[in-house]
Amino acid sequence: MLDPKRLRSDLANVAAQLKTRGYELDVAQIEALEAQRKEWQVKAQDLQALRNSRSKEIGKAKSQGQDIAPLLAEIEDLKTQLEQAEQKADEVQLQLDDILAGVPNTPHESVPVGNSEDDNVEIRKWGEPRQFDFDVKDHVDLAEARGWFDNDAAVKITSSRFSVLKGSMARLQRALIQFMIDQHANAGYEEVYVPFMVNQDSLRGTGQLPKFEADLYKISKNEEHDTNDRDLYLIPTAEVPVTNLFRDEIIEEDQLPRKCVAHTPCFRSEAGSYGRDTRGLIRQHQFEKVELVQLVHPEKSHEALEELTAQAESILQKLELPYRVVTLCTGDIGFSSAKTYDLEVWLPGQEAYREISSCSNFEDFQARRLKARFRGAKGKPQLVHTLNGSGLAVGRTLVAILENYQNADGSITVPAALRPYLGGIETL
RNA sequence: GGAGACGUGGCCGAGAGGCUGAAGGCGCUCCCCUGCUAAGGGAGUAUAGGGUUUGUAGCUCUAUCGAGGGUUCGAAUCCCUCCGUCUCCGCCA
């Protein structure tokens, strides 16, 4: 959520910034509502003040044994006036909140302006795509040939876009998770284990609700078929439970930055993506991810984004997987993000770089709704800045390893860094 | 799942319709005093929003005693719903 004060004092500027990401802010509407808000809020508060002082007088009179009937008569219609004003103020505020909830974050000044993913800017490349002297296979062909991947079984027991992994591939996935968490924990990220189902407040805190409910899986308690506020949702990313650890919390300044790493499955209904990446593990309703989350001092969030991105990159480097780093342009950046780097790994099966991590600085956009704050030496609590990034998407890492480390006979060489996690095995 | 108790400021803990944003204590901050230490005295110590304003200064108003509704001129206090905690029983990994 943007700062409502910015919308009052700097509306034209905010609208201009939002326009670069293709969002049209209805300036006239907001100005009109804001004028109404002011009018009714002031009126309601004045009436409340009047009511409070009158009620005190009545209390005093009564305790002195005086007749309070005249005083009561005096404020007879105060109540209805107050109710009206309060209702009106609430109404206007609700409309403003509604608009505000749908307004995306303003991009940081360093974000390139553009309309679509075609305008994203590659900022660096690491590693050389390997030259193969045989015909490369994609991960599905490689895995199916070895009996590691069973799409039919997944469809039978659930539906499409789920997967059943078997044998070495299942084990490789588990090894990857362990490897990634260990790397991040060694770099100072605190390991946390969190629920995979969350409530609406949490999803609002990180910005998935109200706008993106269609992407989520909702769980209703079966005793009540009607939906209500206590329905839970499967997490689309560990970002939600981990960042919400700090909802309504005030952290001492010397405790910043807070860095966390968590492994969770992620559940996405991916509404609207049918037909894209239907083959294999690239786009699934359930996948494993190791997530990095940081809460930092507002002045340090952009350097923290560089650190966090480098931390995610270090996994790819240790696994010796070629990748590139892309800055998302204003038109491609996520709803809550002020700046995002995508890490794209080289997939020989597709002869393309594909997203394997997304690292974002949300500045105070999430923190505002979360009420995630810190207290400095001097004075009031201030909002922290929040960041997160995948470190990495495990399913896609699995794909990348299979495809990049495949051998002519269909076997897979184990990246050196992972061998300790697989009992020293060198080839699968 | 059944029965009961309870949710108040950073913490402990009073309050049981009005003068309570909330006694008292602990903690913390500042000041005074004491040659060190210990003790003592004084002051301060929530958050959010609005109005005024060049202002994150000052002044002022409003809201908040788990959350949301209700009753009332007036609610921390009464009523309802929900959430959570604790104890006992049942069940289970």
Image (cartoon, grey):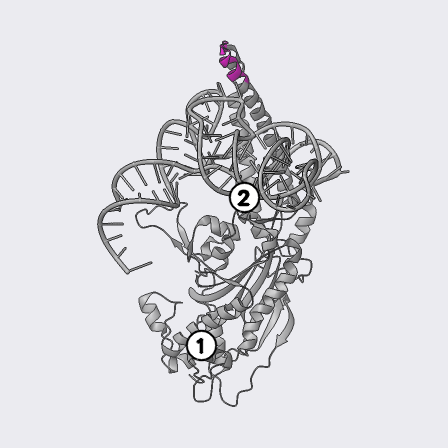
Quadrant assignment, res B51: top right
Residue A63 appears in the rendering: yes
Q: Position of residue A255 (x, y in %)?
A: 58, 55
Please tell me which residue is depicted at 37% across the width and 73% down the height of the picture: A151
User: Is A67 included in the stretch rendered in magenta?
Assistant: yes
Q: Quadrant of the C terminus of chain A?
A: bottom left
The residue marked by circle 1 belongs to what chain? A
Quadrant assignment, res A216: bottom left
Total numbered circles: 2
Q: Position of residue A258 (x, y in %)?
A: 56, 58
Please tell me which residue is depicted at 62% across the width and 56% down the height of the picture: A22
Q: Position of residue A281 (x, y in %)?
A: 44, 72
Is A111 left or right of A247, judged from the image as shown?
Answer: right
- Mark 1 belongs to which amino acid? Tyr
Q: Secondary structure at mark 2?
A: helix
Q: Position of residue A12 (x, y in %)?
A: 69, 46
Magenta residues span A57-69
Is B54 left or right of A79, judged from the image as shown?
Answer: right
